Amino acid sequence: NHCFLPRAYVAGRAVYSPDPDETLARLSDPEFNARNTVLLASKEEVETTSPAAASASAGQVESFSRRPNSVTLQVTLSRPGYVVLLDRLDPNWHAAVDGHEVTILRANHLFRAVRAEAGVHTVRFYYRQRWLAAGLAVSLGALALCGILFLLDLQVAVVEQRPEGAAAPERVGRVTEAGPVKGARSGPGGGPW
């Protein structure tokens, strides 16, 4: 099938294509070599290649391993190129080539790609939400605050539900017939607390 592309492949050539409509039109053109050319939305990442090199394969994906939050590829490149993964682009996905974090490029308007040099590489795409840690910290802080407020409210409720006739808690200062005890604190208006 001429239109078939594998889930992951190596493209030896990149073309700058920032407009989504233009990108989709190029991809649907029967003359477009999608197996060896990737359309990138970032001009800085486009490397120029000779026409002869552009038509030759730049490498291949040797193995593909998928887990719930990661995709790992073993790739071999005969020259610098782009490892393209036909999974939806999302800002929470990150990539590493041989353990070194690299920028994920928008490939063919919808997908992901990374630039790689010639050689054998392990390319790993992994999912990590940017605000997950901050959200977790805020949630735990709110839960702790609720717990503290609950315990304080419970303590106030226990004091208020003292049985009738029970003695009030003892105050810090005592008043005698002669007046406050020396060294005892007084409350507002000169009375005991």
Image: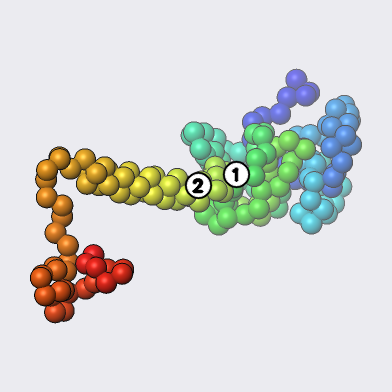
Q: Residue furthest front?
A: 177
Colour scheme of this structure image? rainbow
Q: Hey, which quadrant is residue 165 in on the image?
A: top left
Callout 2 crowding tier (Cα within 10 Å): few <14, some 14–19, many ≥20? few
- For the point 27% across and 47% down, which residue is it? 156
Q: Quadrant of the N terminus?
A: top right
Residue 24 or residue 50, whichever sits in front: 24
Distance Cα–Cα, label 2 vs label 1: 15 Å
Q: Is residue 66 visible?
A: yes
Q: Hey, which quadrant is residue 101 in on the image?
A: bottom right
Residue 13 or residue 39, whichever sits in front: 39
Query: SS of the residue at dot 1?
Result: loop
Viewer-side label of 2, 1: 2
Q: Do the residues bearing badges 2 and 1 touch, measured as CB atoms within 8 Å? A: no
Residue 4 in percent (x, y) is at 73, 24
Q: Hey, which quadrant is residue 3 in on the image?
A: top right
Residue 146 in percent (x, y) is at 38, 45
Q: What residue type is labelled 1?
A: Asn
| Mark drawn on residue 101 | none
Residue 1 or residue 97, whichever sits in front: 97
Residue 40 in percent (x, y) is at 78, 45
Q: Name the residue under label 2.
A: 135
- For the point 17% across and 66% down, which residue is it? 172
Q: Can residue 54 be seen in this view?
A: no
Residue 93 in percent (x, y) is at 60, 43
Instruction: Give the mark nearest the N terminus, 2 or 1.
Output: 1
Q: Name the residue under label 1.
A: 92
Q: Is residue 62 above or below residue 186?
A: above
- For the point 85% across and 27% down, which residue is it? 28
Query: SS of the residue at dot 2?
Result: helix
Residue 157 or residue 43, whichever sits in front: 157
Q: What residue type is labelled 2?
A: Gly
